[in-house]
Structures are given as structure tokens and as C-alpha cells.
Image (cartoon, rainbow, N blue to C red):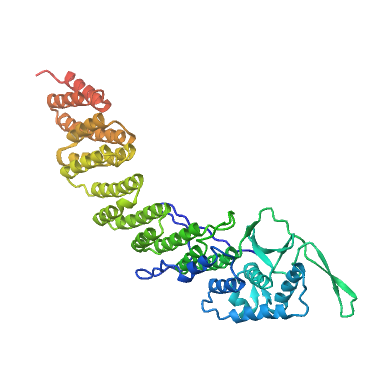
Amino acid sequence: MRVLTFAALFFGILGWSRLGAQAPAAGGGFPGLDADPRALDYARRGASRPYTWQELAGIALWASGDGAGRFMDRILGAAAEIAASPSLPPDLRGRGEFILGYIHDRILKQYSERQTRVDEIFVNGRYNCVSSAVLYVILAASQGIEAWGVMTRDHAFVTLRAGKETIDVETTNPYGFDPGSRREFHDDFGRLTGFAYVPARSYRDRADISPLELISLIFSNRIAGLESRGRYGESVPLALNRAALLSLRSNPVSSPFFADPREDLTDRLLNFGIALVRAGKEEDALRWAALAGERYPHERWEEFIYGSLNNLLVKLIRSQRFTEGRTALNDWASALSRDNRSRLNTLITDAELTHQSSRIRTLRDAEAGLGAVNNAETGRILSPSRAAEMRTFVLLKAGEILAAEQGWQKALVFLENAVKQYGRNSQLDNALRVFRSNRTTEIHNRFADFFNGRKYDEALRVVREGLAELPGNRQLQSDLSRVEQALRNKPAP
């Protein structure tokens, strides 16, 4: 016996909350954004006076999906039959208990947790706590009994007033009148045949809700059922109708268990948009945000637009469609906070620079890439750490190109100057070791050519120039020792 509940589906930047398998249609598959005109008409009727029980019956059938009121005659007939029954007690308490027995004897047949619609009760007799409570409140009102709903975290029932007494009614149980009291049963001759007893339930948190608010739970449960099956678009009109129906309440209930109709509507609108994104229809999701956000503004739309646009940009970036990404960001810039605009701009810029860096083939390419990275850091588009990472990649590419075109000496000088300008890091330090080793090998090989050819004076010149360039280099110091030894041992002419 529980009231079905639902919650908004929230999303992160790239990881959206997991939704059901059924994706909404793209393009023209948007749900309407206008409530049924009857919703506001019903709201107005109760704004200045209590609803009649017939009005409550009509609203309940409409909320259930029976807009034509096909089952109104069944409710009117039940009320007439109760009123005409010779067994109907004259006192309010007795009438309240009689009505509970009547609906279970004549109408309610089988408890079904998700059967929240009043019209369906008359089709197959199935009911849950909400549909049975709504039906009870209507029939109680038809017999002059003031009754209203009570809601807990996962359940709904009824309270009625009988003089100065208030009595709870568990409408899902034929013996649920005034739970905790024991009732005697007698046969036709007045003899006691047994007792019926329904234990009283201890509800730590309970909230009284008006008959209209009780009826609105039919919408809530229908929405929960639809969204559990991934039918997010179909839940939107129900939320619109619920919000309009409850829009003119003079004393709205304040309870964490009773979903605020406006916030509930926002949840439904956003959930439909999130479903579009999960289906890979980010552009449809953004169009939906433009339509629904204008009609029903809320601060949460900005975060939804940011998440949807982020996902779209990631898709465009992966296809290297950077210009389209820039256009999309510019189109939605006014709907984003400065921080979110900055984050998405960084996303695109980072991708553009990464792509540009991967295509470096010449020194001119490297020079352009280095300038772009420096400008992005200066403009605070890239963080210093990310700029340093990308700059290092460009510098290493430039060093490799320079080494291939002009030799390791030029490449080593270039990299040493880059370290002086931009600072050291492990990658540049490792590259310097490699470049020095390669330059050392280059010098040593020239030295070895002269040395092996017994051209010791040329070999000495090469190694001394090398040590001037790479002071303290062990390999070159060893070469120097060898050539000096060779010169000392050289026979006099």
C-alpha cells in the first residue's frame, strides 16, 4: 500500500543519469506545453468555495484519464445506492464505516500497487491506496461527511471528521476504519461470531492533504509509472495538468512527501530533455530547452543547457568539426553563465590546439602552434598546467624537426633556450638528455673518423670544440685523453 514516488534525473558534464531504454522521437516529437483548459477551470472552482462531491468525482475521473467522464454514472449510482440503503447509519461515524464496507463489497475487488486511476476501478475492480482513498473521499462527501487525504512517505489514506472526533480510514482494507479498534461481528440472530481487528499504523511523519491534493496524487503516480518505462514525453502533459490544477490553492500543503507541482513540472520537462540527450539528440534537447525554458523558466535550465551543449560539443570535436562547435557555443552563449561559457570555450580551444599540434610538420607549424598555446594561456582559456603540457609537446616536435633538418646542435640549442624561457619539466629534461647524447655521438663519430685516420690534430680540434659546447662530457673527455696520448706517442718527424 504505497504511493509511487519519482525524482528528477540529474546529470553531470559527460555522464548523464541512466534513463530507461525507450528514447523519445526527434524533431517534431515534442510534447505540448499547454495544460488542459479544464485544469485551470477546476482550479478556479475551488478557489473561493469547497468543491461539491460531484465536482470532485469529475476531477478524479479527468485526472485518471477519463476526460469524457464515462464512469460518472457509476459514481453517481454508488452515491445514490448508499444514500438509499436502509442499513446506512444516521451518525457520521457509522456512515463512514458503512461506506468503507460498501466500496469493498460492491466496487473494490483486488489490490494492485500501481493501479492509481479511479476509472479503472470500475473496469476491473483493481485499486491501490490512492485510487481507493479518492473514491472513498468522494462517496463520503456525498453523504455529508467531511473527509480529506493523509500522505506519508510511501502511503496515502483518509481522515474524516465525525463531530469532534477525527478518524483514520485505511481504505485499502475492508476493516480499515479507525485502525486499532476491534469490531464485533454477529449473525442474523444477533449472536457474536467473531472479531475484526486492523492494527493501527504508527506514522512518524504524516501530512494532511486536501481532497484536490489527494486527487493530484493520481497524476503523480501515473507520471511515475510512465517514467519507469522510459515514456518521459507522456509524463509532461500530466505534470502540466497537475501544476495547473493546484495553481490556485489558498493553503497548499507543505510536506517533503508531497511534490511541489511547479518543481515537479520542471523535473518532468528536464527529464524529457535528458532523455533526448541520452538518445544522442543533443540539438533536439537544446531546442526543447529553448521552448520549454521560455514558457516555464527555472534556474535549472541553465545547467541543462550547459550539459546538453557540452555533450554536443564533445560529439562535434570527436568529428573534428570545430567550426560547428564554435557556432553552437556562440548561439547559446547568452543562456550560459560566464563560468560555463568559459569551460566550454576551454573545451573547444583545447581540442583545437591538440588537433593543431598533432599536425605539426614544419618549423613554421610549430611556431604557430606555440603562439596559439601561449595566447590561450595569456587569455586564461587554458590553465597554466595544461598550457605547459601542450607547449612541451610543441617544443619537442619542433626540436625533432630541427634535428632532422639542421642537426642535433641546432636542436639542442633550441631546446636549451626553450627551457630557459619556459622552465624545466621531466619531459624536457629527458629530451635534453637524449639530444645531448645524440649530439655527443655526432661529435664522437667525427672525432673517431679523424682519429682512426691518424689525423690527430683534426681529431683534437673536433673534441676541443665539442667540450666547449658540452663541457664536462665524459665521452668527449675520454676522447680528449685518447687523442692527447696519441699525440704524445707520435714519433718525431
* Of residues 88 and 277, the one drawn nearer to the viewer in this rendering: 88
Horizontal side, residue 250 vs residue 394: left or right: right
Could you tell me which residue is drawn at 35 percent across and 44 percent down?
Answer: 339
* Of residues 449 and 301, the one drawn nearer to the viewer in this rendering: 301
Instruction: Pinpoint residue 181: horizontal percent, then vertical percent.
Output: 80, 63
In the rendered view, tell whether residue 156 sits above or below residue 464. below
Could you tell me which residue is drawn at 68 percent across and 76 percent down?
Answer: 108
Q: From this viewpoint, is residue 21 visible? A: no
Instruction: Pinpoint residue 35: horizontal percent, then vertical percent.
Output: 45, 68
Q: Farthest front residue?
A: 48
Residue 274 image-quadrant placement: bottom left
Horizontal side, residue 407 vs residue 320: left or right: left
Instruction: Pinpoint residue 452: horizontal percent, then vertical percent.
Output: 17, 31
| Quarter of the picture holding the N terminus | bottom right
* Of residues 480 and 358, the one drawn nearer to the viewer in this rendering: 358
Instruction: Pinpoint residue 63: horizontal percent, then vertical percent.
Output: 54, 71
Q: Farthest left residue?
A: 493
Could you tell me which residue is drawn at 31 percent across and 56 percent down?
Answer: 318
Q: From this viewpoint, is residue 105 visible? A: yes
| Quarter of the picture holding the C terminus | top left
* Of residues 51 and 371, the one drawn nearer to the viewer in this rendering: 51
Residue 321 image-quadrant placement: bottom left
In the rendered view, tell whether residue 132 sits above or below residue 14. below
Could you tell me which residue is drawn at 52 percent across and 62 percent down?
Answer: 246
In the rendered view, tell whether residue 411 sits above or below residue 150. above
Q: How many marks?
A: 0
